[in-house]
Image: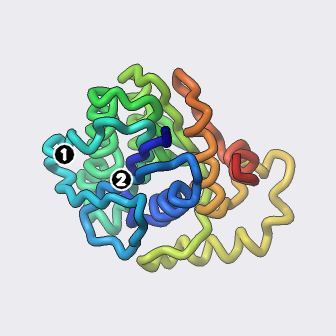
């Protein structure tokens, strides 16, 4: 019998790639997408569930019978409009999804965090990511996997000028990111997605954190 996965945030850069990766894996029977906006993907294994993230608990049935939940939710303060709205997306929605996953007896919860995540950081973005990680670890999920990538490389639906410039520079200078600098080396979003899917099939229990340099290795090949 095959597996069932649920992707939160499938319209984003990593979420879309995770979805595509799952759909191409032979062990996957069904891929459920929890999305706010319409998606243009069509596949026999695909089940699209439109949700209101502020009322996510109304879709708790979507978490039933699921083996792994991939949480790829994330925004920027500029796009969110305020720090409060940013925290709602990157902390509250993620935590609600994890709680529903636990209620649904989901075995693996995999979430995108960020390099530098630290609940004590003076940087708001890093602090929220760290608080999110801390809250998830406190839920005592059967299997929790937190991925901390550096700058993500890939085609986004929206333009991010600063990230675009940084992506060009870090791609051109990739050869220089060795030794201690390897931990901040930019990473293709497709490699992050592949790493997440590879880890999901190990069914490893407990809390695990994957830094950027480890994600590079985990995402090299298909497990």
User: Which residue carries the number 1 mark?
Assistant: 59
Q: Is residue 126 visible?
A: yes
**Nearer to me, 39 or 82:** 39
Q: Label 2 crowding class (10 Å Cα cut-off): few <14, some 14-19, many 20+?
A: many
Give the left or right position of residue 146, taking residue 70 as reference: right
Q: Is residue 150 above or below residue 218?
A: below
Q: Is residue 104 above or below residue 10?
A: above
Q: Which comes sooner in the sequence, label 1 or label 2?
A: 2
Quadrant of res 92? top left
Residue drawn at x 52%, y 55% is 22
Q: Is residue 120 visible?
A: no
Q: Please, what secondary structure does the residue beneath circle 2 have?
A: strand
Residue drawn at x 49%, y 27% is 143
Residue 192 is situated, as x and y percent measured from the top left of the image, at: 61, 54
Residue drawn at x 39%, y 43% is 128
Residue drawn at x 81%, y 58% is 177
Give the left or right position of residue 127, taking residue 192 as reference: left
Q: Label 1 crowding class (10 Å Cα cut-off): few <14, some 14-19, many 20+?
A: some
How many labels, in total? 2
Residue 181 is situated, as x and y percent measured from the top left of the image, at: 78, 51
User: Which residue carries the number 2 mark?
Assistant: 32
């Amino acid at each position: 019998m095959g597996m069932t996965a649920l992707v939160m945030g499938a319209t984003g850069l990593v979420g879309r790639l995770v979805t595509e990766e799952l759909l191409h894996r032979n062990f996957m029977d069904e891929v459920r997408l929890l999305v706010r906006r319409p998606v243009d993907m069509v596949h026999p294994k695909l089940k699209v569930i439109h949700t209101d993230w502020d009322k996510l608990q109304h879709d708790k049935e979507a978490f039933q019978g699921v083996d792994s939940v991939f949480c790829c939710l994330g925004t920027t303060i500029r796009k969110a409009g305020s720090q409060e709205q940013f925290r709602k997306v990157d902390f509250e929605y993620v935590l609600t999804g994890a709680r529903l996953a636990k209620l649904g007896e989901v075995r693996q919860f995999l979430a995108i965090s960020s390099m530098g995540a630290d609940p004590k950081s003076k940087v708001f973005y890093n602090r929220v990511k760290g608080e999110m990680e801390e809250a998830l670890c406190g839920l005592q999920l059967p299997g929790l996997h937190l991925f901390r990538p550096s700058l993500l490389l890939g085609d986004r639906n929206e333009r991010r000028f600063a990230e675009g410039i940084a992506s060009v520079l870090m791609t051109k200078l990739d050869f220089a990111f060795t030794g201690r600098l390897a931990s901040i080396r930019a990473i293709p979003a497709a490699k992050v997605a592949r790493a997440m899917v590879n880890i999901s099939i190990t069914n490893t229990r407990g809390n695990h954190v994957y830094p950027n340099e480890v994600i590079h290795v985990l995402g090299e090949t298909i497990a």
